[in-house]
Image (tube, rainbow, N blue to C red):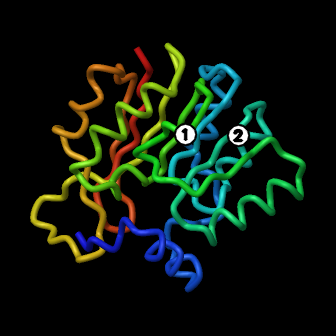
């Protein structure tokens, strides 16, 4: 994977060029279903790798106070302007999601739609531990990630797939409630709902 993928400049360039296939303008149905299920208690929510803040704004409309975090300043600016225009309690921070130590809140919900698989493998355990410290017991965490695809060769700027070893890193802090596996943009992918122990 290209080292530049982890830099704010790389992400900003993608948003400024419009090369953002992940930014579909649609709140993922899995997030909608989770909120409509009533399983998640209202309170603070974290949108990790929030991009332009579409999911952040959705959560704010449904009773959460939201902190969206991303490395792309251009995306955060869009999210901030849109949230202000609607008067929503959604706040956006330029930050590395693998270190949440600057946050003074504990959330009842966290969502990560494709950020975790873009974090270098060497930082994933740090991300998980930091996230766990910022969730209340029983909090839900919805994760979307690419999975390893047999025989598929990664491109230089492709995210690193999330495999069984990565999922095992969650075990000290989280319990897996369910997973759903499928395909996205010709890659194997999965949704995972975990609960803070």
Residue 84 x/y as whole percent:
85, 55
Residue 169 position by quadrant: top left
Q: Quadrant of the N terminus?
A: bottom left
Task: Tell me the residue at 70%/24% (across/down).
Answer: 43
> At 58% across and 60% down in the image, what residue appears?
51
Figure disc tally: 2
Q: Which residue is mark 2?
A: 59
Q: Is residue 80 above or below residue 107?
A: below
> Looking at the image, which residue sits at the far bottom?
17
Q: Quadrant of the C terminus?
A: top left
Is 197 rendered above or below residue 23? Answer: above
Local crowd size for mark 1, using a 10 Å CA cut-off: few (<14), some (14–19), many (≥20) = few
Q: Is residue 113 left or right of residue 74?
A: left
Q: Which residue is mark 1?
A: 102
Question: For the residues marked 2 and 1, what is the alpha-carbon distance in whole angstroms?
Answer: 22 Å
**Do residues under tags 2 and 1 come within 8 Å of each other at their CB atoms?**
no
Q: Residue at x 72, y 67 (%)?
A: 78
Residue at disc 2, secondary structure? helix
Q: Is 65 on the left or on the right of 6, as rendered?
A: right
């Amino acid at each position: 994977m290209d080292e530049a993928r982890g830099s704010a400049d790389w992400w900003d360039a993608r948003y400024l060029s419009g090369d953002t296939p992940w930014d579909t303008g649609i709140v993922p149905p899995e997030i909608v279903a989770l909120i409509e299920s009533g399983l998640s208690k209202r309170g603070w929510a974290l949108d990790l790798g929030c991009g332009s803040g579409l999911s952040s704004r959705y959560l704010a409309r449904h009773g959460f106070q939201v902190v969206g975090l991303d490395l792309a300043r251009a995306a955060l600016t869009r999210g901030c302007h849109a949230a202000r225009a609607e008067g929503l309690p959604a706040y956006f921070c330029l930050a590395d999601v693998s270190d949440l130590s600057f946050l003074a809140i504990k959330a009842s919900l966290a969502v990560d739609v494709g950020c975790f698989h873009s974090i270098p493998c060497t930082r994933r355990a740090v991300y998980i531990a930091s996230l766990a410290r910022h969730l209340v017991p029983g909090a839900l965490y919805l994760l979307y990630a690419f999975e390893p695809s047999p025989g598929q060769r990664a491109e230089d700027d492709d995210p690193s797939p999330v495999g069984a070893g990565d999922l095992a890193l969650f075990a000290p802090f989280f319990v897996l409630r369910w997973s759903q596996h499928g395909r996205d943009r010709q890659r194997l992918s999965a949704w995972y709902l975990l609960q803070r122990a």
